[in-house]
Amino acid sequence: MHLIVGLGNPGDKYSSTRHNVGFMVIDEIIKNLQTTSINKSNFKALVYKAGDSIYVKPQTFMNLSGDSVVLIKEYFNVESENVIVVHDDLDLPFGTVKFKLGGGHGGHNGLKSIDSHIGKEYIRVRIGIGKPEDKNEVANYVLSNFSKEQFYHLKDIIHKCIDAINELKNTPLAIVQSRHTIKL
């Protein structure tokens, strides 16, 4: 069983923002699968099951993502190494995609919340969104929409992430890293 979590914030207001790229990946994955929606209010998430995978969009807002992830992980008895979290990464240029197991949260509040609930030993799909020139503008930047040009390229990036996520279920991380890392 694999738990694939896309990070983002609930609501139409945030649907096209940089911080919601994890939600965008989950939406694109489930669009092409036969899924069963799992409605448990204590999960505080949109949860979809397809085959041996659970796809999750926490509805707790980013800073509390771990509240949702831990409940779903425990309910389905998913091992930490089978948890894949898809998230935006300010430290990577737009269009870059990297994969890693464990590590620090890099100031990402969603990861910080997940780390505090399940530990750090889960796989991360890091999607670069770039960063603003002024560090004081980070909150506004992550909650702003992608530019038209970025949005145009985003579809390809999301599809490459989906290919990698599907491989991560059966292929060692090092191989997925060598095949699917995108550096700009």
Image (cartoon, helix red, strand yellow):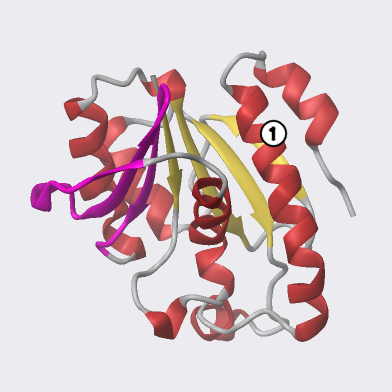
Q: Is residue 178 above or below residue 6?
A: above
Residue in the picture at 52% in, 68% down: 19
List x then y, in percent, for residue 55.
40, 41
SS state under label 1? helix
Residue 69 spot, x, y in % from top left: 28, 42
Q: In which quadrant will I find the C terminus?
A: bottom right
Quarter-of-image position of residue 93: bottom right
**Which region of the structure is painted magenta?**
36-60
Q: Return the residue nearer the eye: 121 or 24.
A: 24
Q: Residues within 10 Å of mark 1 (few under 14, many from 20)?
A: many
131 or 153, nearer to the observer: 153
The structure residue drawn at horizontal position 10% and vertical position 53%, both measured from the top left corner, is: 41
Q: Which residue is mark 1?
A: 164
* Figure quadrant of the N terminus: top left
User: Is residue 106 shown in magenta?
Assistant: no
Of the residues shown, which amino acid type is indicated by label 1? Answer: Ala
User: In the image shown, does 161 or 30 lie closer to the viewer?
Assistant: 30
Q: Quadrant of residue 118?
A: top left
In which quadrant of the rendered view does residue 75 lie? top left
Magenta segment's dominant SS is strand
- Tag count: 1
1 to the left or right of 159: left
